Image (cartoon, rainbow, N blue to C red):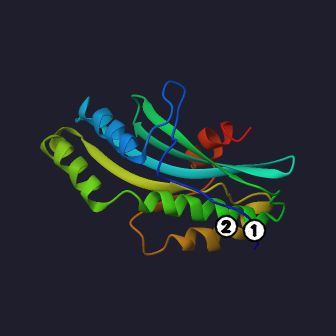
Amino acid sequence: MKFSNFKFSLDDDYFNRSERHLSFGDVKERIIKFIKRDPVASYKLAIGTDSQVKGGYTVFASAIVVHRVKKGAWGCIKKNILDREVMNLREKISIETNLTLQLASKFTPDFFDEITEIILPYVDKGANFSHEVHIDIGKKGETKRFTKEMVGYFAGLDFEAKIKPESYAATSYANKYTK
């Protein structure tokens, strides 16, 4: 794999339809505020990456989505550009998976402890929080041969890996921003 001039950053420049130039700290603050608005709800934090080859380069879009189950979501995107076309499917999926892992790893135990403190008083009323990584692969099509390998890539981490059709952060939200 040749990562020519692949200088990806996961620290800043997150965005969504209403906000731009968010730092990763801003993203964590938005997630906390979103959960504080309804601490009785059930939440899923999903992180995933998708990519699209363009003329001479490849766009990688990493998504962070906090889903208030049956009650909406808040999300943002971080784009990274590789200055070449990634045509090899294994390489493309490996880069997507690595970016997802790097981003998921930025959420520290202190962040999760803060969320636990918010929802803990409401657990008996249904409050819940889980986190998962979403991989843009599935049991059908060309990517099925990578499922075991890429899901195994997250083994030992405190993230449950989801694949198509359940990997909406990668296959739907991030995908929209690779175009």
Quadrant placement of the C terminus: top right
Indicate left or right for 29 with 11 as reference.
left
Viewer-closest of 145 and 101: 101
The residue at which mark 1 appears reads as 90
The residue at which mark 2 appears reads as 94
**What amino acid is found at the position of numbered circle 1 in the picture?**
Arg
Q: Quadrant of residue 90?
A: bottom right
Q: Is residue 124 above or below residue 74?
A: below
Label 1 and label 2: CA atoms lie apart by: 6 Å
Q: Mark 2 and mark 1 in contact (Cβ < 8 Å)? A: yes
Mark linked to residue 6: none
Q: Is residue 130 above or below residue 150?
A: above
Q: Residues within 10 Å of mark 2 (few under 14, many from 20)?
A: some
Element type where label 2 sits in the image: helix
Q: Residue furthest top?
A: 18
Residue shown at 42%/47% (left/top)? 24
Element type where label 1 sits in the image: helix
Q: Residues within 10 Å of mark 1 (few under 14, many from 20)?
A: some
Residue shown at 86%/51% (left/top)? 56
Residue shown at 48%/28% (left/top)? 19
Viewer-closest of 145 and 84: 84
Query: Where does the image place residue 108, in percent across and percent down from the top left?
Result: 32, 60
Q: Residue furthest right?
A: 55
**What amino acid is found at the position of numbered circle 2 in the picture?**
Ser
Quadrant placement of the N terminus: bottom right
